[in-house]
Amino acid sequence: MKIIPGYTLREIAGEKMILMKGSANLDLTKVVMLNSSAELLWNTFQNRDFLKSEAADLLVTNYGIDQVQAVADAEAWISSMMKAGLIEP
């Protein structure tokens, strides 16, 4: 799967948000905010294809969680990003 190009991660008022690049008139009716683990996944996979297993491995490596929890967390992140239209299969 792949993060759809054209989006950028920005910090606004202390919060990490995903915005459309070059959008002068921002429509903030649909904002995707990221926590630290979601930000790590976004930054790591923004410019390349990736697998769910790679996302899970990254969470294990960076947060020391077990593989079962990492897979569940990776699935939740991927699902939420797909629902927001930010990741394509």
Image (tube, helix red, strand yellow):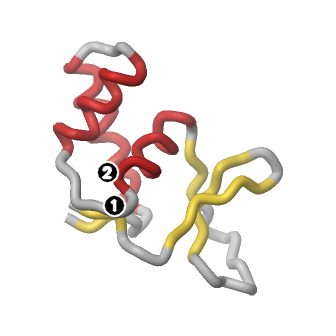
Q: Is residue 87 left or right of residue 68?
A: right
Q: Where on the picture, by quarter, is residue 52?
A: top left
- For the image, the number of numbered tags is 2
Q: Give the x, y percent position of residue 14.
A: 78, 45
Task: Name the mark on residue 79.
Answer: 2
Up the image or down, 30 lies above or below 81; here it is: below
Q: CA distance from mark 2 to mark 1?
A: 5 Å
Up the image or down, 9 lies above or below 40; here it is: below
Q: Residue at x 36, y 14 (%)?
A: 64
Q: Give the x, y percent position of residue 1.
A: 21, 60
Q: Where on the picture, by quarter, is residue 89?
A: bottom left
Badge 1 density bin: few <14, some 14–19, many ≥20, Cα 10 Å:
some
Q: Is residue 62 left or right of residue 67?
A: right
Up the image or down, 70 lies above or below 38; here it is: above
Residue type (three-letter) at the residue carrying disc 2: Ser
Q: Where on the picture, by quarter, is residue 25?
A: bottom right
Residue beneath disc 1: 82
